[in-house]
């Protein structure tokens, strides 16, 4: 490569000169990920619930979503393109299909791992099956669902960088532009934010995942004063 | 009143879990279902709130066949306590206690009032514990909450499935006492499943003994102890307990009867020289340190005091050891002796529910008590007769 004497300041000046365009790509990138994931949650969580209710449904649904995820991302997007045409829509549908498996599977596993004693106790005190789901099973599986979302988000942020190949936007466009013009600055300007986005999403969703582990929930007051104190004075 | 009429339970795999059960659970009584594991006692109990349905036969509550009722509605009117507590970990204590009233769509104010009242009733200050989560409570406290959750919607019937069996012996005893105390005010119809005969004898109005899906004997605890129906009942009760019962009305003494009520104590701010003077005067080798609120702070021995005697500024509070073992007022003497024996203690303080120091069990006080209770044992020895 001819430009191997490029410095960090060259990079910064490139980024600042093109900040408007990069920002637009960045927003497109996030939009596609959020919409794709959103669809996957809207569809995947109910599918997970269905799986937990019926063993056969679980087998079929998990089999299909698993296949969807095993298909190489490029192949999936290209096939979808034949059907939906070029554009963002194709990318978002691809992301949706791709994220379905982790979210459905984790919802299913989360609902299944709830301690049977909570279910017995909920049933025994007179909760209907729906109330049991909404008030007991679902809250206690949130951390699993969140973990599925986290896996899906990190994958989606990666996959979406190939969006330009099927006519989508996002940071991938900058990366491909860099490749085509043999300009490392443009490659970095696309790749670094995309990588950062994946890392930040992983960390933030990881924190959320731990916060939502309600099975060991603690009150905020307990950290401060033990109840014993009243006995001494 | 709850009546089971010719109830059979057959599982698909051919297992005949219940065989022609006919039972009556009297209103306002504690009926204990007891038997070895797999005898069908839990299965029988779960017939009442329709967690289990009979293959044949009827379950009647106040004359109404429950198979005609909506099971969800039925369960909301029957309290339910399970062994593993089953408090929802994602709800705080108030929410847990109020869960059935919320299902029944009570008024928010009414729920809150009821929850606070119940928490205070079992000694859990609602201002402190209401906002805590189950994982922050001890096993005993959690099961207290489990019990009052069953009481929250004021049901007439409460089912308890081995509720105390996972607790340590001391919490178990105190929860049993608490249940008896609550029942004196509440007069609920309680069906209590256990495999522990001591527990059954302690709390039951009526005991139902089961084996292999059949009711073996039903009756008052006293009647079962005096007239076991057959060899199985005899062996289940245990020969020791039968003997005790036959030997008339021997009562197990409580620690409160045995303890010394005026042991030598001192305040934490006393100096070491003072401590020695007190020990000398009272002829003891150690002192209990008790503060102004009668809270037991620690214990100090003569060796410890002499060891540190050189340092003039020190008080007994500086050299004392914490008291590691104590026993609650109302415990039985055998419990105290067991603690003393297993931890090699020469004495054991007795404290009340507010941690106030009441007295001291010493080896001397135990011997003295036994001598008073068993004058006939010492008598022949005094006469030099050998048995």
Image (cartoon, coloured by chain):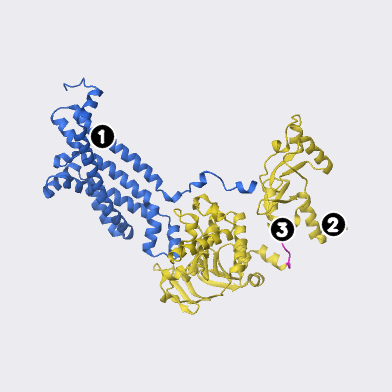
Residue at horizontal 32%, vertical 47%? A148
Seen from this angle, which residue lies furthest right? B383
* Residue under pointer 2: B381
**Image location of residue B98, percent across then percent down:** 48, 61
Disc 3, SS: loop
Mark 2 secondary-structure assignment: helix
Q: Colour of chain A?
A: blue
The percent position of residue B70, horizontal first and vertical second, equals 40, 72
Picture coordinates of residue B25, whole percent (x, y): 55, 74
Q: Which chain is yellow?
A: B
Dot 3 alpha-carbon crowd within 10 angstroms: few under 14, some 14 to 19, many 20 or more: some
Q: Nearer the viewer, mark 3 or mark 2?
A: 3
Pick the front one: B55 or B354: B354
* A111 and B199: which is toward the camera: A111
Asked if the residue at tag 2 contacts the one at tag 1, i.e. Cβ–Cβ closer than 8 Å, the answer is no
Q: Is residue B59 above or below residue B175?
A: below
- For the residues bearing labels 3 and 1, Cβ distance under 8 angstroms: no
Residue that appears at 53% across and 62% down: B148
Relative vertical location of residue B164 with respect to residue B207 in this rendering, above or below: above
Q: Is residue B167 visible from the viewing direction of this image?
A: yes
Q: Mark 1 falls on what kind of element?
A: helix
Magenta segment, which residues? B247-253
Residues tagged by mark 3 and mark 2 found on one chain of the structure: yes
Compared to residue A172, the image places residue A233 above or below, namely: below
Is residue A214 shown left or right of residue B317? left
Give the residue at mark 1.
Answer: A193
Q: CA distance from mark 1 to mark 2?
A: 95 Å
Which is nearer the N-term, disc 3 or disc 2? Answer: 3
**Does A94 appear above or below B161?**
above
Q: Residue furthest top?
A: A5
Q: Residue at x 58, y 69 (%)?
A: B186
What numbered label is drawn on residue B254? 3
């Amino acid at each position: 490569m001819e430009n191997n004497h490029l410095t960090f300041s060259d990079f910064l000046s490139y980024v600042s000169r093109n900040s408007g365009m990069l920002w637009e790509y960045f927003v497109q990138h996030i939009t596609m990920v959020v919409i794709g994931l959103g669809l996957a949650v809207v569809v995947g969580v109910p599918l997970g619930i269905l799986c937990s209710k019926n063993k056969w449904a679980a087998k079929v649904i998990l089999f299909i979503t698993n296949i969807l995820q095993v298909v190489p991302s490029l192949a999936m997007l290209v096939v979808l393109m034949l059907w939906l045409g070029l554009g963002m829509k194709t990318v978002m549908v691809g992301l949706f299909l791709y994220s379905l498996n982790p979210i459905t599977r984790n919802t299913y596993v989360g609902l299944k791992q709830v301690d049977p004693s909570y279910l017995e106790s909920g049933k025994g005190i007179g909760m209907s099956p729906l109330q049991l789901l909404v008030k007991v099973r679902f809250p206690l599986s949130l951390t699993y669902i969140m973990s599925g979302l986290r896996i899906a988000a990190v994958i989606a942020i990666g996959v979406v960088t190939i969006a330009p190949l099927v006519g989508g936007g996002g940071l991938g466009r900058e990366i491909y532009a860099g490749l085509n013009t043999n300009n490392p600055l443009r490659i970095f300007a696309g790749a670094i934010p995309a990588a950062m986005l994946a890392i930040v999403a992983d960390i933030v969703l990881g924190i959320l995942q731990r916060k939502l582990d309600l099975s060991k929930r603690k009150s905020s007051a307990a950290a401060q004063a033990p109840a014993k104190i009243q006995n001494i004075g | 009143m709850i009546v089971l009429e010719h109830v059979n339970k057959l599982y698909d795999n051919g297992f005949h879990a219940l065989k022609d059960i006919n039972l009556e659970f009297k209103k306002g009584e504690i009926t204990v279902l007891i038997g070895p594991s797999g005898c069908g006692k839990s299965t029988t109990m779960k017939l009442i709130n329709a967690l289990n349905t009979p293959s044949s036969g009827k379950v009647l509550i106040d004359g109404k066949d429950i198979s005609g009722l909506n099971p969800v509605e039925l369960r909301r009117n029957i309290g339910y306590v399970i062994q593993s507590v089953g408090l929802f970990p994602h709800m705080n204590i108030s929410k847990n206690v109020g869960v059935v009233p919320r299902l029944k769509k009570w008024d928010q104010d009414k729920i809150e009032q009821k929850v606070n009242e119940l928490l205070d009733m079992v000694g859990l200050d609602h201002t402190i514990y209401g906002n805590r989560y189950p994982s922050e409570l001890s096993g005993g406290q959690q099961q207290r909450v489990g019990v009052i959750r069953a009481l929250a919607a004021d049901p007439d019937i409460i089912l308890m499935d081995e509720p105390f069996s996972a607790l340590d012996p001391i919490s178990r005893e105190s929860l049993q006492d608490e249940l008896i105390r609550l029942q004196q005010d509440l007069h609920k119809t309680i069906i209590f499943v256990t495999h522990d005969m001591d527990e059954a004898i302690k709390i039951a109005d009526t005991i139902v003994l089961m084996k292999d899906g059949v009711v073996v004997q039903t009756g008052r605890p006293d009647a079962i102890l005096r007239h076991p129906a057959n060899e199985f009942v005899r062996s289940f009760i245990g020969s020791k307990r039968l003997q005790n019962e036959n030997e008339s009305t021997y009562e197990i003494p409580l620690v409160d009867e045995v303890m010394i009520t005026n042991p030598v104590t001192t305040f934490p701010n006393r100096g070491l020289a003072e401590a020695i003077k007190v020990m000398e005067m009272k002829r003891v080798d150690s002192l209990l340190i008790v503060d102004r609120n009668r809270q037991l702070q620690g214990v100090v021995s003569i060796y410890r005091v002499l060891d540190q005697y050189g340092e003039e500024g020190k008080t007994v509070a500086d050299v004392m050891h914490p008291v590691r073992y104590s026993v609650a007022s109302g415990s039985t003497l055998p419990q105290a002796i067991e603690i003393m024996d297993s931890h090699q203690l020469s004495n054991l303080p007795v404290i009340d529910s507010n941690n106030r120091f009441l007295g001291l069990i010493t080896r001397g006080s135990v011997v003295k008590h036994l001598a008073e209770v068993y004058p006939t044992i010492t008598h022949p020895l005094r006469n030099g007769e050998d048995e």
